[in-house]
Image (spheres, rainbow, N blue to C red):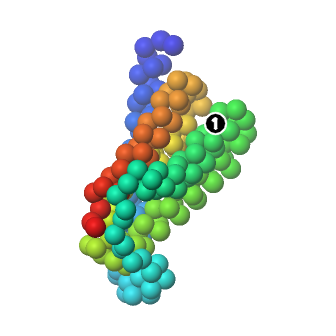
Amino acid sequence: MDAATLIGSRLSALRVIAWTQAALWGSTLGVAVVVRAAGFTHSAAAELAFRFPATTRSLSQVLSIAGANLRVVCVLLALGELRSLVPATVLPARGGALLLTLANSSLVGVAIGAYGVKALEWLVHLPLEWMALSLALLPLFSGPRQPGRQRTVAALAALCAVGAGGLVEVFLTPL
């Protein structure tokens, strides 16, 4: 691969990450604002019924949380690989990925809207989770000639972000 192609693929990857970050944060905060502005805070809080329990600060808790987030990331990575193997699946794969990520970010937005500042204390890990999702979406939304090495690096970085998010969620949220 020549230098121009490599630089172009990296710029394309940065654009994809920037756009997916904007979409995740925009949908999260947009839903939070709607829940607050429409006066749905009490009904949303009652429906979610979060108790904000004290977490067990242990490696097993980190693995449990990371495992739950890993399922979403793995589905997104699998859709990206499907897209690279069977190009005709690009639109359905992208649609499924968008629905999955927007459902995830909207649920967080409902929680922020319902619980306000109290929810923010429990979401210190959110930037890492959103970065993991952005990296996992990279193979789906990058150009069709994205190098296999770049897909592998994005997948490994997404997995690291999931693990780091689990650590932050367990050890930096309130007791």
* Depth check, front residue: 41 or 156: 156
**Residue pictured at 52% horizontal, 44% vertical:** 137
Farthest-out residue, top: 2
Is 139 placed left or right of 32 in the picture? right
Q: Position of residue 75 (x, y in %)?
A: 61, 48
Between 60 and 39, the one lying in front of the other is 60
Q: Give above or below for 48 relative to 143.
A: below
- Mark 1 element type: helix
Q: Quadrant of the C terminus?
A: bottom left
Q: Residue at x 47, y 12 (%)?
A: 2
Read off the residue under disc 1: 81
* Residue 31 drawn at (x, y percent): 42, 71
Tell me residue 131's x, y (percent): 40, 46
> Which residue corresponds to the image point at 29% horizontal and 62% vertical from the top-left?
173
* Total count of labels: 1
- In this view, the residue in front, 5 or 64, is 64
Amino acid at dot 1:
Glu
Query: Residue 169, relative to residue 16: is it above or below?
Result: below
Residue 19 picture location, percent across and down = 42, 47
Question: Is residue 17 something one can see in this rendering?
Answer: no
The answer to whether 108 is drawn above or below residue 100 in the figure is below
Evaluate whether residue 148 shows in this view.
yes
Name the quadrant containing residue 41: bottom left
- What's the residue at 41%, 22% (across, down)? 7
Residue sitting nearer the eye, 27 or 127: 127
Mark 1, other Cα within 10 Å: few <14 / some 14–19 / many ≥20: some
